[in-house]
Image (cartoon, rainbow, N blue to C red):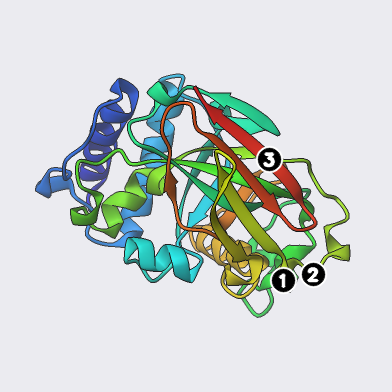
């Protein structure tokens, strides 16, 4: 894609995001056809959103890192989007259902980075879970908030979904667990409850075999663009349950073994 096409695609998405309107397919003339072009559009979208006082990017979300989510969306590889500062919540969050178009929730593991992750920390030019693990200062149980902003996301194609931050709409983080190395992070059981009823269960091992494999995937994606993951960023590593779409007045609880519980209400 030419730079002007990247800009026009990002502007198309930003208008819909700012006005809170559903999107049909991006105009064919500016529709990204590859994931590489999609991430270029996404980066331009971040610039536009920041310029319009919609918040700075404070981290990333990674989607499609578990079989249940890959099956649900029909996408077989991870995809990344941004976390914006105004959409970052903690422990027990009261959220306005009407601020979303079609909100959903996912049960996630998230990490806080205590140091940068750049290309120079990679082993033989590629990051793995060992090379990124040293940067993780704390781990959280988390609720990811997603929003289906498309008229029919199943007909859109993966590059356009990536360009729009891959459904990302925010997160609620539980208590930070600094002693996470004492846990078997790849074998923790997780559960989501909606209005007190179990809505899904899974294991952290479903996240690419180990949650830090997802962080390594993201580090490789970011460093391939000549950038780094930065100290202080939050990264959502993937959902252990299928997305649950929520209604007004729903209460959502996510609990991950050893990481605690986090709650969100949609008023």
Q: Residue at x 42, y 33 (%)?
A: 47
Disc 3 marks which residue? 262
Q: Nearer the viewer, mark 2 or mark 3?
A: 3
Report helix, strand or loop for mark 3: strand
Report helix, strand or loop for mark 1: helix
Give the number of the disc on residue 184.
2
Disc 1 marks which residue? 187
Task: Tell me whether circle 1 and circle 2 mark residues in contact (CB < 8 Å).
Answer: yes
Task: Tell me whether circle 2 and circle 3 mark residues in contact (CB < 8 Å).
Answer: no
- Mark-to-mark CA distance, 2 and 3: 20 Å
Q: Residue at x 65, y 80 (%)?
A: 124
149 left or right of 56 in image: left
Relative to 90, say whether 109 is above or below.
below
Give the number of the disc on residue 254.
none
Residue 228 visible here: no
Q: Residues within 10 Å of mark 1 (few under 14, many from 20)?
A: some
- Mark-to-mark CA distance, 1 and 2: 6 Å
Q: Measuring from the top left, give residue 222's x and y in whole percent.
A: 53, 57
């Amino acid at each position: 894609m030419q730079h002007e096409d990247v800009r026009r695609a990002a502007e198309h998405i930003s208008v819909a995001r700012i006005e809170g309107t559903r999107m049909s397919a991006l105009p064919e003339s500016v529709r990204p056809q590859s994931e590489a072009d999609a991430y270029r559009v996404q980066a331009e979208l971040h610039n536009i959103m920041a310029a319009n006082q919609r918040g700075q990017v404070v981290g990333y979300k990674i989607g499609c890192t578990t079989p249940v989510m890959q099956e649900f969306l029909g996408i077989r590889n991870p995809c990344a989007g941004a976390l914006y500062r105004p959409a970052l919540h903690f422990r027990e969050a009261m959220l306005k259902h009407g601020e979303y178009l079609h909100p959903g929730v996912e049960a996630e593991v998230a990490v806080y980075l205590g140091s940068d992750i750049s290309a120079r920390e990679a082993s033989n030019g590629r990051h793995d879970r060992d090379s990124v693990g040293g940067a993780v200062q704390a781990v959280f149980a988390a609720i990811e908030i997603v929003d289906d902003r498309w008229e029919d996301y199943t007909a859109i194609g993966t590059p356009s979904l990536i360009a729009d931050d891959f459904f990302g709409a925010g997160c609620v983080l539980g208590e930070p667990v600094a002693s996470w190395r004492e846990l078997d992070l790849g074998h923790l059981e997780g559960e989501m409850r909606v209005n007190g009823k179990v809505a899904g269960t899974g294991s952290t091992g479903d996240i690419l075999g180990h949650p830090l494999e997802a962080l390594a995937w993201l580090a490789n994606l970011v460093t391939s663009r000549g950038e780094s993951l930065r100290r202080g960023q939050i990264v959502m590593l993937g959902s252990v349950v299928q997305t649950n779409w929520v209604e007004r007045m729903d209460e959502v609880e996510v609990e991950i073994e050893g990481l605690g519980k986090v709650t969100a209400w949609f008023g």
